[in-house]
Amino acid sequence: MKPGLAVLLASVYGLTIRILFGFLSEIMQIMGIVFLALIPAIVGFVTIYLMPVRQLTSKTFAFFMPWVTSLILLVVTILLNIEGAICWIMIFPFFAVMAGFGGLIAFEIKKKQAQKNAEKNDWEKPTSLQVSLLFMVPVLLGFIEGERSLTPKEMTIRREVSLDATPKEVWQQIISSHETLPSESSGGSLSNLMGFPRHSKTTLDTAAVNGKRIAYYEKGLYFEETISQYEPAQKLVLAIKTDPHKIPPTVMDEHILIGGKHLDILEDVYELETLSDGRTRLLLSSRFYINTPFNWYAGIWAEYLMKDILQNELDRIEQRILKSQVRALH
């Protein structure tokens, strides 16, 4: 079988399995070991196994050729609105590597078959049982796995900045209602490049415990925050409650939906400290949880993205302080 046709059939297999898991999402998890590890390995295995031995020039080829299949799945599922771009960007490295391992396994099997019988070193038509097992085994294992592999993990990310301003000036910018101007938007940040909505404005009804703050973002995304600790010019603690049902489906993929099964932001904390040189250190931290079978991998992305989002907030505060100081001079 020609390599192009092998890639096409493996892509069709991967797409079919994704549709099956989506249709049976009440009993099977896309964010599970079976779908995130086993399925890409099978996709890679099928990609290489369907090719004739003479096309399998090296282990490098067997490892990276399934990446082409993975890329096709990425493009097709995004175009069909089955998966979101943010979700794919984060999972693609893991998915492609697992597909590569599957390709290596197929490579070794094909080579051993060729050594046993040189006349059977080309592609052999799979039996009906083999094809059935390709679909039945992942579905059965996915059903058995369910939510058993999900492991909640709480994380806290911190970022800080030293500002040439008094604690009172910094505090005023934190508790004030404000809009984010285009000049304050970090368009080149990692979170924005990945499609996370940009901040548009923040409102606060009362600067006191139980006061309500709402942070608005593009595309209808917003976070409702309640002040749980209020120490003027020292510390502000915000408890965050996000209703995933109020987030437009076009904003976030269901697998990384804030407030959903796999991700939620719990609390933000602003802390101010007066430095010896008269400047103010502003520490911003965010406490959140992730809930996946691969928290070690999801945690890497969560840390980078949350650091980026927190840094954007600190940058906006610094820019507003500078503008207020310039206005005061005039």
Image (cartoon, rainbow, N blue to C red):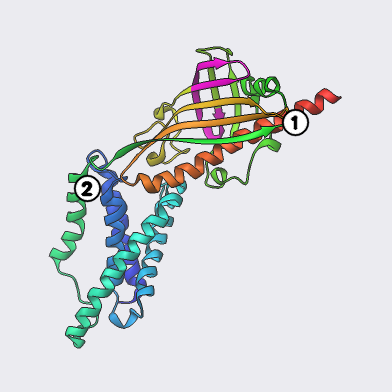
Instruction: Tell which residue pokes out farthest to the right in this image.
Output: 330
Q: How many marks?
A: 2
Q: Give the magenta part as a residue range.
A: 216-238
* 194 sits left or right of 20 in the view: right
- Residue under circle 1? 322
State whether residue 301 is above or below residue 318.
below
Query: Marks 1 and 2: which is nearer the front?
Result: 1
Residue 179 visible in the picture: yes
Using the rendered view, name the quadrant where residue 50 is placed: bottom left
SS label for mark 1: helix
Question: What type of secondary structure mainly makes up the magenta span?
Answer: strand
**Real-space Cα separation, disc 1 to disc 2, in angstroms:** 54 Å
SS label for mark 2: helix
**Amino acid beneath label 1:** Leu
State whether residue 195 is above or below residue 130.
above
Q: Quadrant of the N terminus?
A: bottom left
Q: Is residue 220 magenta?
A: yes
**Mark 2 neighbour class, 10 Å CA radius: few under 14, some 14 to 19, many 20 or more:** many
Using the rendered view, name the quadrant where residue 55 is placed: bottom left
Where residue 154 appears, as percent x and y from the top left, is 38, 34
Where residue 152 appears, as percent x and y from the top left, is 32, 36
- Residue under circle 2? 142
Q: Nearer the viewer, residue 285 or 97?
A: 285
The residue under the point 49% across, 31% down is 286
**Amino acid beneath label 2:** Gly
Does label 1 or label 2 sit earlier along the sequence? 2
The residue under the point 56% across, 12% down is 208
The residue under the point 31% across, 65% down is 101
Using the rendered view, name the quadrant where residue 255 is placed: top left
The residue under the point 37% across, 33% down is 260
* 260 sits left or right of 160 in the view: left
